[in-house]
Image (cartoon, rainbow, N blue to C red):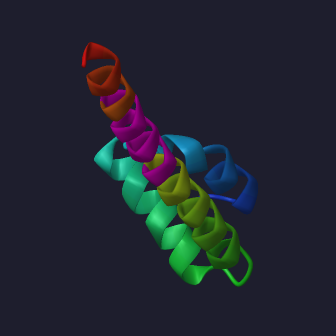
Amino acid sequence: MMALSCAEARDMASDLLDRELSPELERAVDEHVAGCPTCPALYRALLAVHHELQRLRQEEQQMEAINSEATEI
């Protein structure tokens, strides 16, 4: 098992959300967050931002598709 410091876990946050970590590193980050008194709040906030960005991207794509269809008419 790989034990991570808070700094190491934070450095991997973006890669974790983008699913770019190896399974071993994902487990290490998850284990760190589960046992850390400060990191869970950070990860919840990052996850919320990540989900909101995904939602906005989807909304933008839908609007572009609607606009594209409207200009074809």
In the rendering, at what x and y percent does residue 47 appear? Answer: 54, 62
Residue found at x 56% / y 69%: 32
Q: Quadrant of the C terminus?
A: top left
Please tell me which residue lies in front, 28 or 18: 18
Q: Quadrant of the N terminus?
A: bottom left
Span highlighted in magenta in the image: 55-65
Which residue of the protein is positioned furthest toward the top in this rendering? Answer: 72
Residue found at x 56% / y 66%: 48
In the rendering, at what x and y percent does residue 61 appear? Answer: 38, 34
Can residue 3 be seen?
A: no
Based on the displayed image, in which of its 4 quarters is residue 64 positioned? top left
In the rendering, at what x and y percent does residue 44 appear? Answer: 59, 72
Q: Is 31 covered by the magenta stretch?
A: no
Please tell me which residue lies in front, 24 or 72: 72
67 above or below 3? above
Please tell me which residue lies in front, 42 or 69: 69
Residue found at x 46% / y 67%: 30
10 relative position to 53: left or right: right
4 above or below 64? below
Can residue 40 be seen?
A: yes
Tell me the chief SS of the magenta region: helix
Q: How many marks?
A: 0
Q: Is 64 covered by the magenta stretch?
A: yes
Which residue of the protein is positioned furthest toward the front in this rendering? Answer: 73
